[in-house]
Image: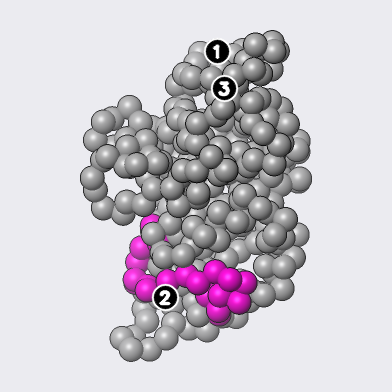
Amino acid sequence: MALSCCFHRHVAQLRHQGATEANAGPAMAVLHLNSDWRNVSGIIAAARALPPGVPLIVMIHGYRFCPFSPTHDPHRHILALDPTLPGPRLRSWPAALGMRGEDGALGIAFGWPARGGLGRVYHRAGVIGRDLGQWIGALAEAAGRPVQVIGHSLGGRVALQAMAGAPAGSVGRIILLAAAELRPAAEAAMDSPAGRGAEVINVTSRENDLFDFAMELVVSRGRHAALGFGLSQPRPNWLDLQIDAPEPRAALAGLGFDIGAETARACHWSPYLRAGLFDFYRVALGQPWALPLRLLRAHLPERQAPRWSRLLQLPGRPAAPHGAQG
């Protein structure tokens, strides 16, 4: 834990850096940070120089990426503005979130070692997330605005644990993409000082049921549910969005966001590969006032389709309707 202690001392130093960094030049559209916490001061400087109204978005990859492995580096793949690492399931998050232009958000692409056994990586994600939360506090303070976060898979756990460890008011909105987290940990994060003031959009899909079930077995031996059906009780600052059913797709279309209708029986990556979704994410993170949770909740179904309704769907028949399980 020596690295974590050094990290916390470094965050404390960053909070008291002088005005020299506040006069730094214009921020790049995407800055890259890893869990070894190098280049932290440069990112804090960019946050201080950020013009009013420009959103600050932290992007967190999921399982099996590692920034310290050239062949698994997320900064050359989904977290790159111009990806150079070939491979399946490739979509540039920064480009899709509109970070290429000068008027777009400032993106922080966060990399962490997410390779290894699922149980070990799950635990590691919690530790790294807590450290990230302290850094997000320093980042929000430097920028003078809350930080927005988007994370996929175990990156969703990192995001929630970062919120759990962040100061009150430092996190604005989190978008979870098929988050690999369990309900008790997520509910504890929502009860934290930052969690009580933040908003969470939990993007789910019955395509992810198999992955949720596997995580429940491996991480909790089946004792706790994953987030495929959200939290155990409704909360005003938490919204579930199932993307593979016709009703939510129609609701989003009514709000101006047409998302793809293609579905698979099992897919862990559809929350960032499905066509049109990043148009929604871009507005939800960059202009959250345009998509308040109460507006989304008024348009979306109250319940989700039951587990296994996609995997066990008969050919040529629609998935089970909403309302069977919440």
Tally the numbered discs.
3
Disc 3 residue crowd, few under 14, some 14–19, many 20+, Cα 10 Å: few
Q: Is residue 56 above or below residue 17?
A: below
**Percent x, y of residue 158:** 52, 39
Q: Does the rendering let one see residue 160?
A: no
Mark 2–mark 3 distance (CA, rounded to whole Å): 43 Å
Identify which residue, 87 or 228, lies in the foreground: 87
Rendering coords of residue 138 (x, y %): 66, 25
The mark nearer the N terminus, 2 or 3, is: 3
Q: Report the residue marked by disc 3.
A: 25
Give the residue displayed 33% in from the left and 89% down from the top.
316
Could you tell me which secondary element the residue under label 2 belongs to?
loop
What type of secondary structure mainly makes up the magenta span? loop
In the image, 185 versus 194, the foreground residue is 194
Q: What's under tag 3, amino acid-wise?
A: Gly
Residue position for label 2: 261
Label 1 environment density (alpha carbons within 10 Å; few <14, some 14–19, many ≥20): few
* Amino acid identity at mark 1: Cys
